Amino acid sequence: MIIVDIKKGDFINLLHVGIDDTDSPDGMCTTYLATTIINELKKNKIKINGFPRLIRLNPFAKFKTRGNGAISFKIAIFNNQSTDLIKEIVLSNVEKLSMTEHENTNPGVVFYQGKINKKIEDYSLKSIHSIITIEEAEKLAKEVGAEIHKFKKGRGIIGSLAAIGCPLEDHTYELITYRTKKNHGTKRAIKYDSVISMNTKTYPETFENIDDDYIAIEPKTSCPVLYGIRGETPEILKIAKNIVKVNEPIEYSTIFKTNQHTDIHLKKVDKIDKMEKYGSYIVNGTVTDNPHVITGGHVFFRLSDNSGEIEASAYEPTKDFRKTIKKLIKGDQIQLFGGVGCGGTFNIEKIKILSLNKKQVFKNPKCKCGKTLTSAGFKKGFKCKKCGFKLPNGEKIVIIEDRELVENSYYETPTSARRHLSKPLIRN
Ligand code: ATP
């Protein structure tokens, strides 16, 4: 991306542009719309400053289409030059390309000229941690002097303002390639072997590429994205793109700076009862019942501390992670990372084992002949089916079984089930 040349004596002000809620499950993608806008700005000799930003917001927001992502970028404005052309390009593209015919697509655009202050940052973090109303976003925009543009209900201003204000101390990058219009909605022609080769050559500087046979860089929806590669630096993403081979034209590609895979959504709380619905947390507690599986393959157990108790779950899409969760037993001390969904259940993203309880199993005693004794009937002790030996007053023996989990270790959901904001252990 082009960095603007700043000359001595120039008065520079940054114009921040935020865009959100332009797509629907039937198509479009706010990153694609932003790329179209950035390209048109470029044609008009307007360069954006640094990388455009893809900011993921609260994973539990009700009206999200998919990953609750919003976009922002900034443009250096020299010596009070007019911003009219920039605004016209942004607004006309949002109006023209957004899927406004869909009931739940309510685009919003925000322009903000100046420094990002604490108020905007705090608002942005709040939109990652909890639920915000359109009125709240409007109120903040008024307070800080941001210009808002609402299309239909204009719910997108919530995310647009948040995308502008999100601090990115920890950050990653995503390189997204886009398909030509005629290919939208058709099967993507990505050479899977080349993705595996890219992963072998660039992991862990790139991550979330594959998960056994699952090619994670390829979206499963009919959006304009051909693939997205996630990584630590723009440089490694360019190398990775050169390794991935496709059998269809790439219309354009853009690298976004992003809060994906940083755990920015997780707040540490010292008590279970401090957690609220739609928030994401790191919390410690004791397992109070052995995990059980319900229809559909979802695994549940309860976690408690001296303030209360919560139901925790590893849902079916988390695949083998459920096997780990099933190994927990009553009395284990663990740390959970994840969020509280609309039903009040804690959706686990990762766990750390703090301490393991002793796992006692009760077994029948062995006979002198080596065979394991069987029950001789209610309160009648044991008998040997092989040699006929009887042990009328015998009791079961307690055995301490080895635990397969390891104290102080972390376990995480697989790539295929990972939330956009969730930090993979490889990034620790
Ligand atoms: P995609 O990832 O495919 O671009 P999406 O999942 O980001 O789509 P949007 O179409 O952008 O979904 O819709 C999300 C809507 O939710 C937007 O209007 C956005 O402003 C709003 N929103 C985002 N975060 C919050 C929040 N914390 N509270 C309330 N509304 C929110």
Image (cartoon, helix red, strand yellow):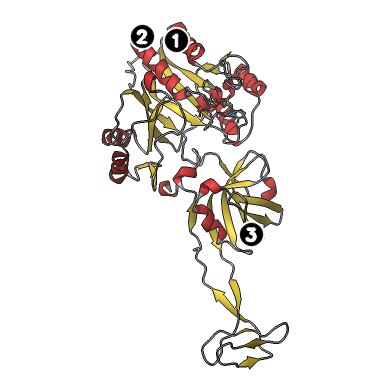
Label 3 sits on what residue type?
A: Thr
> Element at badge 3?
strand
Residue 312: percent from left, percent from top: 63, 51
Q: Give the numbered dot on residue 89.
A: 1
The CB of the residue at mark 2 lies under 8 Å from ligand 1: no
N-term-proximal mark, 3 vs 2 = 2
Residue 127: percent from left, percent from top: 59, 31
Relative depth, front residue between 119 and 170: 170
Label 1 sits on what residue type?
A: Ile
Q: Are marks 2 and 1 in contact (CB under 8 Å)?
A: yes
Q: Is 201 displayed left or right of 13 in the figure? A: left
N-term-proximal mark, 2 vs 1 = 2
Q: Residues within 10 Å of mark 3 (few under 14, many from 20)?
A: many
Q: Residue at x 43, y 48 (%)?
A: 428
CA–CA distance between discs 3 and 2? 60 Å
Q: Give the numbered dot on residue 286.
A: 3
The CB of the residue at mark 3 lies under 8 Å from ligand 1: no
Label 2 sits on what residue type?
A: Asn
Q: Residue at x 51, y 30 (%)?
A: 166
Name the residue carrying label 2: 44
> Element at badge 2?
loop
Q: Is residue 279 above or below residue 395?
A: above
